[in-house]
Image (tube, grey):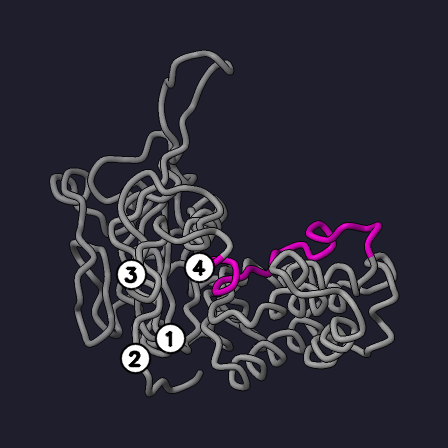
């Protein structure tokens, strides 16, 4: 984990919400809303890597797309370097903010060569296509660990890790300040994951980039992130520096996630794993009060099911949304698997 000396805020989210309407038909009235992101407030500091973790359906990918203005927010505000995102032109946003998708193959045109794929954002933004462009693409490919002669190949001729490097080269083409990494290593083998993570760390140091890293893998987050935001049902449950979160988790949900990390230890005691009861509630009908109370082993009736907890600071840089945050050393009751 890196130590940051520059705490300048690059991106600020203020009570951001994204509700998707539910209709029974195209011309039917709205019946309900999916509360995909429901009141998220946080900042992303310049030069840091902010990890965003949570179960599938918690809203982390939607949050990332909101930050990039790929989908409009329902309410709230997103501010980039002091300017509200919705006041910026999309062309200007793309020069400053880019994304690397989970499936690199799915984000590339199979009929285009790597040269065309990497140069496309440059051409769209007014750069002339010629010998200078070829040199630029070659330099970008080399910067991500590929060779210049790879630019004549098509996506199907590359492995998964190589495709992800091509996607990263394309994201770097316009020299952005910020890159959203949406589970960029989840489809890769473990050895290839390590290579891509090390490459990202190297590129970030060289270019002074800011990352938001969306993933469900806590091991990956621990390796690459400066801070971690834990999401549950569209809200931030806990936000802290990476070491603080892993050593002193305060939210019961964070405890459960951390207990599920595989430990390469012979004879590991599986009884310490916290197995949550029930399923994740529907974001179209979230529970009242604390959204985690239906699965929480320490929830108290009359409080947790009635009052929604605020995200409050319990220590320097450590915030948690829980009525009864856990103290260091406190363990949750075990719920045995059936």
Mark 2: few/some/many CA within 10 Å (<14, 14-19, 20+): few
Between marks 3 and 4 in the image, the one whose residue lies nearer the viewer: 3
Residue appearing at x 26%, y 65% in the figure: 250
In the image, which disc is placed on residue 7? 2
Mark 1 or mark 4: which comes first in sequence?
A: 1
Residue tagged 3: 42
The region drawn magenta spans: 92-112
What is the secondary structure assignment of the residue under circle 1?
loop
Residue tagged 4: 53
Left or right placement of residue 323 versus residue 260 in this view: left
What is the secondary structure assignment of the residue under circle 2?
loop
Mark 4: few/some/many CA within 10 Å (<14, 14-19, 20+): many
Residue tagged 1: 46
What's the CA distance linking mark 1 and mark 2? 7 Å
Residue 99 can be seen in this image: yes
Between marks 1 and 3 in the image, the one whose residue lies nearer the viewer: 1
Q: Are marks 3 and 2 in contact (CB under 8 Å)?
A: no
């Amino acid at each position: 984990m890196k130590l940051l000396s520059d705490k300048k805020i690059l991106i600020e989210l203020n009570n951001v919400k994204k509700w998707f309407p539910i209709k029974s038909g195209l011309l039917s009235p709205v019946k309900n809303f999916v509360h995909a992101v429901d009141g998220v407030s946080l900042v992303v500091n310049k030069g840091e890597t902010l990890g965003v973790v949570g179960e599938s359906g918690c809203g982390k990918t939607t949050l990332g797309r909101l930050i990039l203005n790929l989908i409009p927010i329902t309410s709230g505000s997103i501010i980039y370097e002091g300017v509200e995102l919705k006041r910026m032109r999309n062309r200007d946003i793309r020069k400053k903010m880019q994304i690397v998708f989970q499936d690199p193959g799915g984000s590339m045109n199979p009929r285009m060569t790597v040269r065309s794929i990497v140069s496309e954002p440059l051409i769209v933004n007014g750069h002339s296509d010629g010998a200078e462009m070829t040199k630029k693409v070659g330099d970008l490919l080399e910067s991500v660990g590929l060779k210049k002669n790879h630019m004549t190949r098509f996506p199907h001729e590359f492995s998964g890790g190589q495709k992800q490097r091509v996607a990263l080269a394309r994201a770097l083409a316009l020299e952005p300040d910020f890159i959203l990494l949406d589970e960029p290593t989840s489809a890769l083998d473990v050895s290839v994951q390590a290579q891509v993570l090390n490459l990202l760390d190297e590129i970030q140091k060289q270019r002074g980039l800011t990352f938001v890293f969306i993933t469900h893998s806590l091991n990956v987050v621990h390796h690459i992130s400066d801070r971690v935001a834990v999401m549950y049902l569209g809200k931030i449950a806990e936000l802290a520096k990476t070491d603080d979160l892993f050593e002193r988790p305060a939210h019961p949900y964070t405890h459960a996630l951390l207990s599920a990390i595989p430990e390469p230890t012979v004879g590991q005691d599986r009884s310490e794993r916290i197995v949550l009861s029930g399923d994740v509630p529907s974001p179209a009908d979230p529970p009242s009060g604390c959204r985690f109370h239906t699965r929480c082993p320490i929830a108290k009736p009359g409080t947790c099911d009635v009052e929604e907890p605020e995200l409050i600071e319990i220590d320097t840089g450590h915030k948690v949304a829980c009525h009864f945050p856990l103290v260091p050393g406190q363990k949750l009751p075990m719920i045995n698997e059936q």
